Image (cartoon, helix red, strand yellow):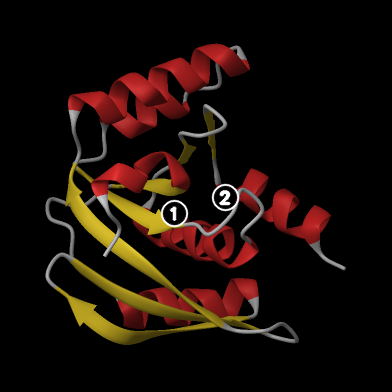
């Protein structure tokens, strides 16, 4: 599970859902179709699961995800990130999201975590927040980051 003490080491995906629930089948379908990535459930956990991310031509891996209700702190972080970027409207989109997903990230350049976040954000219709970098971005920027990190 994604530990509370490790939240700055996670990516946070805002979700336009009333409740956080694993949607692995939808994530997999979207991942295969638009990201060349298979996604599966390795292990269900109390508030999330351990998710297999298998991009075409790359080494697969497993990352933990944890879903919960959106907090006021999440919105403050989104507002700070947007202010740092000079605007863009993603913090307003975050306010329309009722839940969030924390995605385990093993390093600041963890492309498996970023790929999973991009797929989830695309399906769940919310922005991605990187609390460590104080950055909020959408699927398009996530794709650009993934392209830049490709060998």
Q: Residue at x 41, y 74 (%)?
A: 27
Quadrant in the picture for residue 29: bottom left
Mark 2: few/some/many CA within 10 Å (<14, 14-19, 20+): many
Q: Position of residue 39 (x, y in %)?
A: 46, 82
Instruction: State how far apart marks 2 and 1 are (Cα).
Output: 7 Å
Residue placed under numbered mark 2 in the picture = 139
Camera-nearest residue between 128 and 25: 128
- Where does the image place residue 69, in percent across and percent down from the top left? 15, 44
Task: Report the side of 80 relative to 76 (left or right).
Answer: right
Q: Is residue 130 above or below residue 125?
A: above
Residue at coordinates 26% horizontally, 33% vertically from top-left? 96
| Image x and y of residue 102, in percent | 33, 52
Q: Is residue 22 visible?
A: no
- Mark 1 = which residue? 121
Answer with mark 2 or mark 1, whichever residue precedes in sequence.
Answer: 1
Q: Is residue 15 visible?
A: yes
């Amino acid at each position: 599970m994604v530990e509370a003490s490790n939240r700055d080491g996670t990516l946070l995906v805002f979700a336009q859902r009333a409740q956080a629930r694993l949607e692995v089948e939808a994530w997999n379908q979207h991942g295969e179709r638009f990201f060349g990535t298979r996604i599966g459930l390795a292990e269900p956990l109390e508030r999330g699961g351990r998710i297999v991310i298998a991009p075409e031509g790359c080494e697969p891996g497993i990352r933990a995800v944890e879903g919960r209700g959106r907090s006021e702190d999440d919105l403050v972080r989104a507002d700070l990130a947007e202010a740092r970027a000079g605007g863009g409207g993603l913090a307003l989109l975050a306010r329309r999201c009722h839940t969030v997903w924390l995605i385990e990230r093993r390093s600041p350049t963890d492309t498996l975590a970023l790929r999973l976040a991009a797929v989830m954000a695309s399906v769940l219709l919310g922005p991605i927040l990187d609390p460590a970098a104080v950055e909020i971005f959408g699927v398009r920027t996530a794709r650009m980051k993934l392209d830049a990190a490709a060998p």
